[in-house]
Amino acid sequence: MAISPFESAIYRELLRDNEIGQLFTDTAEIVAWQHAEGALARAQGELGIIPEKSAAAIAKACGKTRIDPASLADGSGRDGIPIPALIAELRKAIGNDEHAGYLHFGATTQDIMDTGLVLRLRAVCAIVEARLKLALNVLADLADAHAELPMAARTRRQPATPTSFGAVAAAWGRPLLAALESLEQLRPRLLRVSLYGAAGNSAALGPKASELRAAVAAELKLEADDACWHSDRAALAEFAAWLTRICGALAKIAEDCLFMAVPEVGEIKLGGGGGSSTLPHKQNPVQAETILGLFDLAAALDAAMTRALLHRQQRDGAAWLLEWHALPQICAATGRAMQLAIALLTRIEVDPERMRANLEGRHGLVYAEAIAFCLAQEMPRSGAQDLVREICGNAVLQDRHIVELATERFPEIDWQTVADPVTRIGDAPAQARGFATNVRSL
């Protein structure tokens, strides 16, 4: 196995997200660094900080030079960072020593690497946003189509009361809707240029440092402010947590679907199952299981991103290294989980008859609450609850339906109406349709 299964030739069809994976290749990272260096040179040339001819030569080299990632390996191993080796390669490409001397003028390695990172995270945001909208539309269709389809709500792994499958789908989607809505607040905090110099005080950048930051940010279409974030990693940790929250919402969907698709429950069927090496009758729920595994990974790595909030003093190589391991994998795990979840939701087959059978099964105990509230109109509520508790016990002991026993005790009440699942799902249909409306108004 490769050290990272995301990059394994064996597991890539299961785990790899090509769109997001391409953003975290060595080549993509180098190109992002070159964009940052080129934008810095152009802005410095426009502001008169370096000669315009030098700025043009640097920008040209940054835009056209293709650097072999392997050429940076020795330098990274020696320095612990790749930018000095990158600068050496770019200076060779520039050719003119006078022009090359202005490359990376006043910046520090972390400025270039952090700016290159947020350029790629901007693309991650766009990919995740598009997939959130797609997943939400699939869930809105499910919620709307099944707004009034009764099924058993379950609390603490046991049948509770009737609800509707549409309301369940809406509950699956609401955390994703909240994540989509919070993205607009997150983007400005995350997608900021980094340009503060070696110790974060902009000393080597000169008196136009603030103006230069704004110019580079405008060039790269990023935000700019004068607060150095070399050691303030809150926005990166927030982004990691945001992705992990999305992954957790998808894991909730996968877990619920796994339960509902168990043959003994049988309320839905999941397409895209995988085969067994020895059991020909099996269709393993690969998509749902993989989503759960990806969430577990993202959650573990999110803890590492939280740990990496401790960047010591003005810059810290150790905590920074932890980010290099954790953040790309959180992006990859969430991206792949989203692809799998969309495929899973698109292929769900709902079995209304089995949902109704499960409602009536286990002696109809899901109607206990309805019966108790009905009786509470005729007697104190505590007495009604005690009486229904007794009826429930007898239903289990005698293997009879709870409505049958309630009818024997109180024949004057129309228990079939009281225990009609269509009338006992409360505002579940409104919840389902309200969610669908909110999604379609995006």
Image: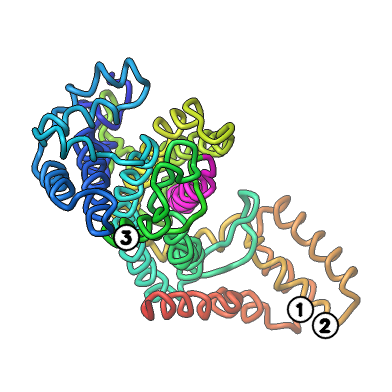
Q: Toward which corner of the image does residue 292 lie, by quadrant?
A: top left
Q: Does residue 349 show up?
A: no
User: Is residue 236 highlighted in magenta?
Assistant: yes
Quarter occupied by the C terminus: bottom left
User: Is residue 389 highlighted in magenta?
Assistant: no
Label 1: few (<14), some or many (≥20) within 10 Å? some
Q: Amino acid at mark 3?
A: Ala
Label 3: few (<14), some or many (≥20) within 10 Å? many
Q: Does residue 174 show up?
A: yes
Which residue carries the number 1 mark?
374
Magenta segment: 231-254
Query: What main secondary structure does the magenta stretch of the protein show?
Result: helix
1 or 3: mark nearer the eye: 3
Q: Amino acid at mark 1?
A: Cys
Label 2: few (<14), some or many (≥20) within 10 Å? few
Q: Residue at x 31, y 64 (%)?
A: 134
Q: Amino acid at mark 2?
A: Gln
Q: Toward which corner of the image does residue 392 lie, by quadrant?
A: bottom right
Q: Toward which corner of the image does residue 32 lie, by quadrant?
A: top left
Position in image of residue 387 (x %, y %): 84, 65
Position in image of residue 214 (x %, y %): 37, 60
Which residue carries the number 2 mark?
377
The answer to whether 86 is drawn above or below residue 209 in the figure is: above
